[in-house]
Image: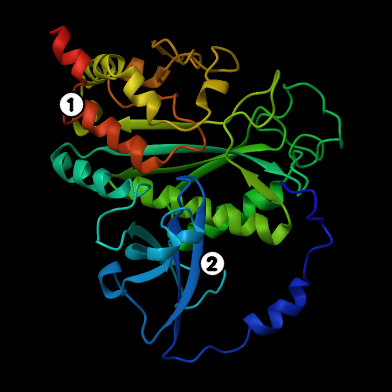
Amino acid sequence: MNPAFSNTAATDKAVLRRYLDLPQPDDKVMATYIWIDGTGENLRAKTRTLDQEPKSPKELPWWNFDGSSTGQAEGSNSDIYLKPVAIYKDPFMLGRNKLVMCETYKYNKEPTATNKRLSCEEAMNAAHSEHPWFGLEQEYTLLDRDGWPFGWPKGGFPHPQGPYYCGVGACQALGRDIVEAHYKACLYAGINISGTNAEVMPAQWEYQVGPCEGIEAGDQLWLSRYLLLRIAEEFGVQVSFNPKPIPGDWNGAGCHTNFSTLAMREPNGIEAIDEAISRLKARHKTHIAMYGKGNERRLTGRHETASINQFNAGIANRGASIRIPRQVGEDKCGYLEDRRPASNCDPYAVTDIIVRTICLKEKDTEEQSAK
């Protein structure tokens, strides 16, 4: 969002293509290691050469980086370890090259503060028999380099919300090239992306990842964010996961989380769904604390949200904390949608606490003392 960076700071992609098309030695593979930095929201990446193509994360070596430059260590003890946990095909370098999602560990091999994956995987393993499925709806906003929404009049505003949701046309769908490039890149990489659409605010979009079982939901969403950021970079456009990028009468951005267990998906699963909602209600504040920074600016009770200070649930109600889709209400089985997570949430933290609350039946201290 630094206005010092102008759109003239771009390179000729046709020239780049000459070098990307150079043949790659058969015994060399490029592996791009990707990790979450000290903000808990931003991604970092760097690439190394391997002598053979890895078939699983266990075949990849641990690596390290300068944690003092990512807010994860002091300069006097700056090395942070990277542990590969998931690998994907690389849609940028193609061939046998890989993208590698990593966990971060301190010098003593303890997880860093922003390594939420370790706890998440423990929860998923404990709840494995319930087969927890997730569908994550990632909303985001495209921005010019000056930080103003992509395609908006400079210093001004477009027409009010209304024609933009799932819109078609040059004045309705702002940035579709990036959206469609991202869609194809996700499919190529092996991300279970299930759809995409223009959102209510112009220059705001959404894509959906899932259904994914267990830890794969967090892995795939983080990797999909990396792909989106890299693709937008090539177009000279920024991506914002700010839950309320523009104040005023504009929709915010969320990461609605659809969830089900095997019991919910089976006949009369509505009973398990109702029980899950009761457990979510009892831990509302605990969940909100895990659902993203600045979420209070989005969860106002307006613009298709519930108030951050209240919990409610309803069938087909997009102003509820938890929405039960109409078809689920009719079929008496299926899934629930938690509409509270913000667009900048850590999907590891979100899926972790949902499983701990619903499947592992964890309770808060206040809740236990009340009983």
Instruction: Give neighbour class at mark 1: few <14, some 14-19, many 20+ (Cα, 10 Å).
Output: some
Q: Provide residue 165's location: percent of width, then percent of height.
A: 66, 29
Residue at image mark 1? 362
The local secondary structure at tag 2 comes to loop
Residue 355 is drawn in which quadrant? top left
Q: Is residue 112 above or below residue 280?
A: below
From where the camera sits, is residue 270 visible? Answer: yes
Residue 87 is marked as: none
Q: Nearer the viewer, residue 331 or 12?
A: 12
Name the residue: 66% across, 27% down. 200
Residue 78 seen in this snapshot: no
Q: Residue 299's spot in the image, x, y percent? A: 52, 19
In this rendering, position of residue 156 left or right of residue 164: right
Between 314 and 58, the one lying in front of the other is 58
Tag 1's secondary structure? loop
Q: From mark 2 to mark 1, how far is it between C-alphas?
A: 40 Å
Instruction: Quadrant for residue 185, please give it.
Output: bottom right
Q: Which picture quadrant has residue 371?
A: top left
- What kind of residue is marked 1? Glu
- Please tell me whether residue 273 is drawn above or below residue 91 in the rendered image: above
With 183 as the anchor, is 262 left or right in this view? Answer: left
> Of label 2 and label 1, which has the lower sequence position?
2
Residue 317 picture location, percent across and down: 47, 13
Disc 2 packing (10 Å; few <14; some 14–19; many ≥20): many
Which mark is in front, 2 or 1? 1
Residue that carries the numbered disc 2 in the rendered image: 91
Seen in the image, is 276 located left or right of residue 300? left
The colour scheme used to paint the residues is rainbow
